[in-house]
Amino acid sequence: MFESITDKISNIFKNLRGLGKLSEQNISEALGEIRSALLSADVNFFVINNFIQRVKDQCLGQTVLQNVTPEQQFTKVISDELIALLGNETAPELSSKRPLKMLMVGLHGSGKTTSTAKLAYFLKNKAQFSLPLAIGCDIYRPAAIDQLEILCQQAKIDCYVDRDSKDAGKIALFGLKHGKENGHDLILFDTAGRLQIDENLIHEIKDIADKIHPDEVFLVADGALGQEAANVAKKFHEAVPLTGIILTKLDGDSRAGAALSMKEVTGIPIRYMGTGERIEALEIFHPSRIAQRILGMGDVVSLVEKAQEQVDEKQAKELEKKLRKGKFDMNDFLSQLQSIKKMGPMESLVKHLPGMHNANIDSEANDRVKQTEAIIYSMTPRERSNPGIIDGSRRLRIAKGCGLSVQEVNALLKNFKQMQTMMKKMKNSRSALASLLGM
Ligand code: GDP
């Protein structure tokens, strides 16, 4: 899988020797090579630009670590950002609704019918479901119905088809009724595909979705399509909101463009991946494992992680000291924000605070953190260490620099002042920090 980009990237890392402290100049050659490796893997151009910019920002904000070379640190940044491109976390578990209804959509030849049978087989084997049912809703190609039946036989999955009906919506509805009456706990609807997205195809999928109210809508997309797979997903998503992507044909020499462009272009997570024609060849899509496969430097990444943990501990102790002395400034604040980000999803952190149970907290909190970081990045080093000097004209300049309003800059400074006071009284810097973010 992704052999070509893996080869290219590992060559880039082989040539990284003696970088010295990471700087824009000394990483620029490697970044140029990474850019061209991503371009030839057919990753979306805007995705590449954002990726390179994030890597630069991360590298320049790195603390020098003991026992770790700058090249190793650089590798870790690339690894983190690759994982982010692939979607960060593994997608959430399936809902506990029964029967769970999954609508499978996609272009002709993407691997939809095969993936329908594979997914039923996979989930049955994982003991998540005991009695899946696949429903054939392709009324145009009798061969597609035959194929679904054959695959279901191989997978020992029940199958519902109606060769006489010319109404896909009705087949779906009758199939669903049949499934419910017969105690099926998972029902997958295999729909027709076309060579391209057209009005009839979208109309038919919408009709089926309106009738059956699916819990999951999976777009099956051919990984060999490269970044075009992300455009296909975007168009389907506009018609029927997708809950996930199944990326197929990632075996062989498939390029990484589809996997690396999908999440950033569409916002939809890749949930499963097809890795061969056999019924067993379906796996959960784990961004970190895939990133590791592409980068092939797992040991370096864990080495840097360990060194970072040590620095975090040291920083925490220094912070305690500053807190006690009341010397907490914007630089400390920034490094605290960054260490909080490293702790993973905001939701789990914020949920521990009183009155914070609302479901959107994760994205709200992350946006707030990003805004706050942008404001601090627009300050000069002197302003960061002496926030007291930030007068009206400095506020205006900072607001312009980060593209936010003066009111937002004012709000941060006001909260920061309150927090400094509060921090002197509080042992727990995290709660004070959360209050600064208005969470
Ligand atoms: P549909 O038209 O979208 O229903 O596509 P099919 O399920 O008929 O699949 C089209 C072709 O792709 C078939 O020959 C499948 O065996 C093959 N296929 C599907 N998924 C994979 C995969 O993950 N890897 C490989 N190598 N082939 C696959």
Image (tube, rainbow, N blue to C red):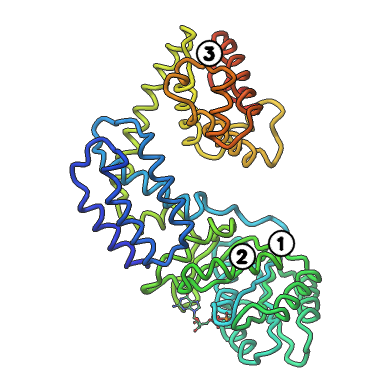
Q: Which mark is residue 215?
A: 1
Closer to us: 252 or 201: 201
Residue ID for mark 2: 234
Q: Position of residue 120 (x, y in %)?
A: 60, 71
Q: Position of residue 110 (x, y in %)?
A: 54, 77
Query: Residue furthest toward the top?
Result: 325
Amino acid type indicated by mark 1:
Asp
Q: Residue at x 40, y 40 (%)?
A: 58
Label 3: how many Cα within 10 Å (few below 14, some 14–19, many 20+): few
Q: Residue at x 53, y 70 (%)?
A: 229
**Which numbered disc flags the more N-terminal residue, 2 or 1?**
1
In front of the other: label 2 or label 1? Answer: 2
Q: Are marks 2 and 1 in contact (CB under 8 Å)?
A: no
**Real-space Cα distance between discs 3 and 1?**
53 Å
User: Vertically, is 328 above or below 217?
Assistant: above
Label 2: how many Cα within 10 Å (few below 14, some 14–19, many 20+): some
Could you say which quadrant of the image residue 21 lies in? Answer: top left
Closer to us: 51 or 293: 51
